[in-house]
Image (cartoon, rainbow, N blue to C red):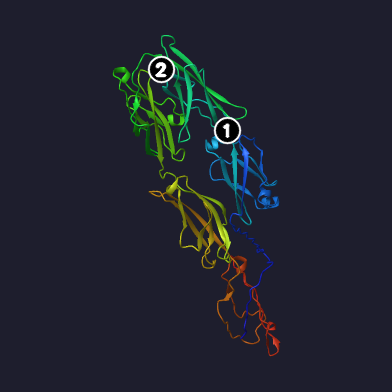
Amino acid sequence: MFVIRMDCMWISAVRGRWRTLFVILCFCELSSVTGQARYSIPEEQAEGSFVGNIARDLGLDVARLVAGKARIITKGGRQYVDLKRDKGTLVIKKRIDREELCGKTTPCSFSFDVILENPIHLYRVTVEVTDINDNSPSFPKPEINLKIVENAAVGTRFALANAADPDVGINDIQKYALKPSDNFKLEIQNQADGGRLIEMVLQKPLDREKEETHTLMLIASDGGEPHRSGTVRIHITVLDANDNAPVCSQPVYKVDVRENSPAGTLITTVSANDADAGLYGDVTYSTPHINKEAEQIFDVNVKTGEIKTTGKLDFEKSKSYQFNVQASDHGGFTDTCKVIVNIIDENDNVPTIQFMSFSQSIPEDSPPGTTVAVFNVDDEDSDGNGVVKCSINSDVPFKIESSLTGYYTIVTDNFLDRESVPEYNVTITVSDQGSPPLSTSKNINIKISDVNDSPPKFHQSEYSKTVPENNSPGFSVFTVSASDADWGQNARVSYFLEEKEINGVAVSSFVSLLPAMPDPLL
């Protein structure tokens, strides 16, 4: 009886159709955000203009940017800045119009992330866009036509249209002037909401018999360098006497309207009373100074004062609208009331998932906490409608961690064993807190790569057989076999005889091992 022992060994070369397989596995481990950078640039810079030395400001070598495949990650929208990895600098990719980017919001800025791999590092970069005086003040219409009764009392006020300037700060409108100023003077009142009430005040009585019309010029000027200005011509027709002016029922109308309300939705009705009788007591309604955006969404019935929607309301585009409604009689008297429309957010945006980095395969000896994937979650809605909850299926050895607002990582939560489970299907589900909630899901497949952690095992613990003496060399005694739970090269086994002696003679002088045909599955 012979005893045969088997060990596992690495195979560096195999004849025939077998070749040595070397597998190099690279894994990225995400560290938390390690730095931030902030820059300030004027708008309208040419493409390729220098923004900042991101390598220097983050304390990185240019070689690290290149080796880490540094790249810019943006959350939707346009990418205004490009990264020159080989120089470590940020440059303008697309010409930036501050007014298009932020409107009247100031300060104006946009943010993006710079991500590096091997290991993964994430940096937040904020670029403030400063204003230049590239817009002139403009009025809603080139002309204003007024009808004023000849016996209008000195001190009677007439509201005029505000000019608009997309620029901000000192580049915005700084002053108004009225020319000539023989019969009228200009008064400006700052309102609580930050707007201005511009009124033309009668300071000298009118006489229709002497002068039936007057032409004035209203000039709006900004404070930029060089100064820019815009004008509107005011045509005044002097009418015969009208004793009473319309009076609005209330100075301010506030109303809440849900976004996505269908066209034709009645939001409110303004009203005014005029004590006069007949034609002078007939009141009509208009919005002579409404801005273009509100004009495309709201319509005022000239006779009833009903205000209805004519376009789509989108909370994500604008949260509120303000405009004035003017009540006029046929004698030239007017009164003005303000309408404030607040848009109520609807849960009409589904959360989105965007992967920043993902390892499709990890080794089975990866310790708990190994990073598998990094992804970003975003919801364009506001308040509870935009608050998201992120989760994965519970039957996998992974968990979700939040590394930065809106960013999540999937890490191993337990030890892995490829021989038990060779791969996992992970479902990422993101849902918001709207009513009803909206959600989205993405599936990823994570394969577990093999490491040589399973020893070979014989199919039998002991082999025994009796053979006759004097048999010829090459006589087959029996066949032994073993298997290894590992995969590929790690499952290849070899056999050899333990060095023992029988009656002082080495076992190898009696028997030898012949290799069997290789398993085609290995």
User: Toward the viewer: 162 or 190?
Assistant: 190
Which residue is disc 1 drawn over?
170
- Rendered location of residue 17, percent (x, y): 65, 63
At 57% from the left edge and 36% from the top edge, which residue is drawn?
98
User: Toward the viewer: 368 or 206?
Assistant: 206
Which residue is disc 2 drawn over?
147
Residue 418 appears left or right of 63: left
Q: Quadrant of the N terminus?
A: bottom right
Q: Amino acid at mark 2?
A: Lys
Secondary structure under the numbered disc 2 in the rendered image: strand
Secondary structure under the numbered disc 1 in the rendered image: helix
Name the quadrant containing residue 373. bottom right
Residues at discs 1 and 2 in contact (Cβ within 8 Å): no
Q: Say whether disc 1 or disc 2 marks the residue closer to the N-terminus.
A: 2
- Rendered location of residue 9, percent (x, y): 65, 72
Name the quadrant containing residue 117. bottom right
Q: Relative to 261, say whether 59 is above or below.
A: below
User: Toward the viewer: 402 or 5?
Assistant: 402
At 37% from the left edge and 21% from the top edge, which residue is drawn?
333
Q: Quadrant of the C terminus?
A: bottom right
Name the quadrant containing residue 250. top left
- For disc 2, the neighbor class at 10 Å (few under 14, some 14 to 19, many from 20) is some
Q: Relative to 65, say whether 211 is above or below.
A: above
